[in-house]
Amino acid sequence: MPELPEVETVRRGLQPVLEGRRLLEVRQLRPDLRFPLPLDFVLRLEGRRIERIDRRAKYLLMFLDSGDVLLVHLGMSGRMLLIDAPDSTALLPHDHVVLRTEEGREVRFNDARRFGYMDILPAGELETSKYLKRLGPEPLSNSFNGPALAAALQGRKSSIKAALLDQRVVAGLGNIYACEALYGARLSPRRIAHSVRGQRAERLAGAIRDVLQKAIAAGGSSLRDYVQTSGELGYFQHAWAVYGRQGETCPDCTCGGPPGGGISRLLQGGRSTFYCAHRQR
DNA sequence: ACGAGAACCTGTTTGC
DNA sequence: TGCAAACAGGTTCTCG
């Protein structure tokens, strides 16, 4: 589930619970997530204070007072569960790592599919690490704009949809927001990537920023209700324009439903793409 | 070198 | 209703 806006929302929810707090106890419930955890995983976390929580693309970065960074990727189904009363809350299925703070609260990394992972590395090695070194620009940073996007797409013969999922082109988009951004920019997901340049690239870069900012704002506005009844962080009711809306009328088409208008589903590289063939060219 | 597809793993939804 | 197949928000590897 987590693309950039969801990870950012999780980051903001974790800040008041973890930032500036000391980890009194860390429990590792299995030796591996997607990858094996470091052998000294617990040792390097217990007793450390979390000074700052950052985000890069879909990665959460927890900077420790030891100079290490705890890097977290939520994969497809990873969640951070907030447990206020740990002693009366049994471990749930797929709770893999438990962080207990000095305040007696817990943050649990829960991940059924186990595509998520964690690692610990020295802060100085973060940028050149295998995780971050190939990432493209942050879409909400100043370095991301139409010309930068066009340059990254130059020579690419895949579909624009596939290119947007490549984290080297722009970091943080996943299947949902790639669909939504293409809808916002009125570009067909089947369009060949390198044909998106000039004005089209401006439109797409703008749509990407727009869609991400709105999704983050939707999370942020419900920050008060941040902890769901399940204690889960980062789930929100998103008002997606096209994603998951196959068969519905396009919100922007006045031509009525199919044929011609209406939202259809397409399979690209094994992933579902939702789009309006009438609006997107 | 590049792009499509498979693989990783488990839970939920869909279709016969 | 029951069961099997399809599908799920990510990333990386292999193959052609």
Image (cartoon, coloured by chain):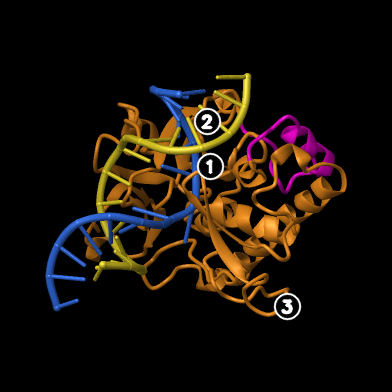
Chain colours: A orange, B yellow, C blue
Q: The residue under label 1 is which amino acid type?
A: Tyr
| Number of the front mark, 3 or 2 | 3
Dividing the picture into quadrants, the one containing residue A157 is: top right
Crowd rating for badge 3 (residues with CA inside 10 Å; few <14, some 14–19, many 20+)? some
Q: Secondary structure at mark 2?
A: loop
Mark before the other along the chain sequence, 3 or 1: 1
- Under circle 1, the secondary element is strand
Residue A179 seen in the figure: yes
Please say if A22 is above or below A91: above
Q: Position of residue A15 (x, y in %)?
A: 54, 54
| Residue receiving disc 2 | A131
Res A115 quadrant in image: top left
Chain letter, disc 1 residue: A
Query: Chain under label 2?
Result: A
Q: Which residue is mark 1?
A: A59
Any magenta on residue A151?
Answer: yes
Q: Which residue is mark 3?
A: A255
Q: Are marks 3 and 1 on the same chain?
A: yes
Chain of the residue that carries numbered disc 3 in the rendered image: A
Instruction: Tell me where residue B14 appears, x and y as whole percent.
Output: 36, 68
Q: Which residues are magenta?
A: A135-158
Nearest to viewer (mark 3 / mark 1): 3
| Residue at the image position 36 percent from the left and 64 percent from the top | A84
Please state if B3 lies on the left or on the right of A233 as rendered: right
Residue at x 57%, y 75% (from the top left corner): A248
Residue A159 or residue A236, whichever sits in front: A159
Element carrying mark 3: loop
